[in-house]
Amino acid sequence: MHEPFDITTIIFALLAVFVVWKLRSVLGTRTGNERPPYDPFAARRKAREGSANPPGETGTVIRLPGAAEERASESAPASAPLVAGEQWDSFVNPDSRAAEGLNRIKSADPAFSAANFVEGARVAYEMIVSAYAAGDRNTLVPILAKDVLDSFSASIAEREAQGRKIDTTFVSMDKSVIEDAQLRGRSAQITVRFQPKLITVTRDRDGTVVDGSPDQVADVTDLWTFARDIDARDPNWRLVATETVG
């Protein structure tokens, strides 16, 4: 004998099907190929977490100063008042163009620190000179602007073709001072005068000295210009120009 027809059960069943369909149409379904949620600050946090490169990555990123551990510019207003010139007394003449340039850079990027910049520029100088001498292109790639990298790479390639090797020893860094500073559009550019004492010797395939001396300390003066787009997420400064004086 058949049970009586229950219209209420059918109505609830149809309602349940409708609710499930509606949820799927709004929330979607998982296929197993979904991309993880996008974190716009992941790259910046990764740059702040240690200097070691993840497996499979090459090169060394030099966090030149101006990229503070906590970027004040992330929460600072887009336009800050110019700071007092006396802030740069330890680095440049307060009435110089360099002081004015530092003022403008600081105004555009409140996290900028001249003291940290000079300290980091010294580290970068030694690393770049050592990498060039060793023919270590991977270290140079993230530190140099493209035209400077091309010039360095061509010189390294020529040296390798000749079978020559350079040994460079840093004796001391007598001076590293800010020579000039400018804000060109949104590009901060700072020129540093480096005056190190170096021992540099170039040898051929047989180990014969063809330039320099392993026993002679040389005084060197270099003018290097570093630049950074202050609107870029990348906190690193890059070498955009070099000049050897004398």
Image (spheres, rainbow, N blue to C red):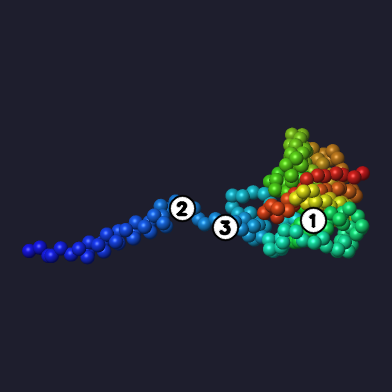
Asked whether, in this view, residue 73 is left or right of residue 84, the answer is left
User: Circle 1 is placed at which residue position?
Assistant: 105
Quote the CA–CA distance across marks 3 and 2. 15 Å
Would you identify the image quadrant in which residue 156 lies? top right
Q: Which mark is residue 34?
A: 2
Q: Residue at 34% of width from left, 60% of height from top?
A: 19
Give the foreground label among 1 and 3.
1
Kind of residue at disc 3? Asp
Q: Earlier in the sequence, mark 3 or mark 2?
A: 2
User: Circle 3 is placed at which residue position?
Assistant: 39
Would you identify the image quadrant in which residue 150 lies? top right
Quadrant containing the N terminus in the rendered view? bottom left
Q: Is residue 27 visible?
A: yes
In-front residue for pair 216/105: 105
Q: Is residue 217 shown above or below 11?
A: above
Kind of residue at disc 1? Ile
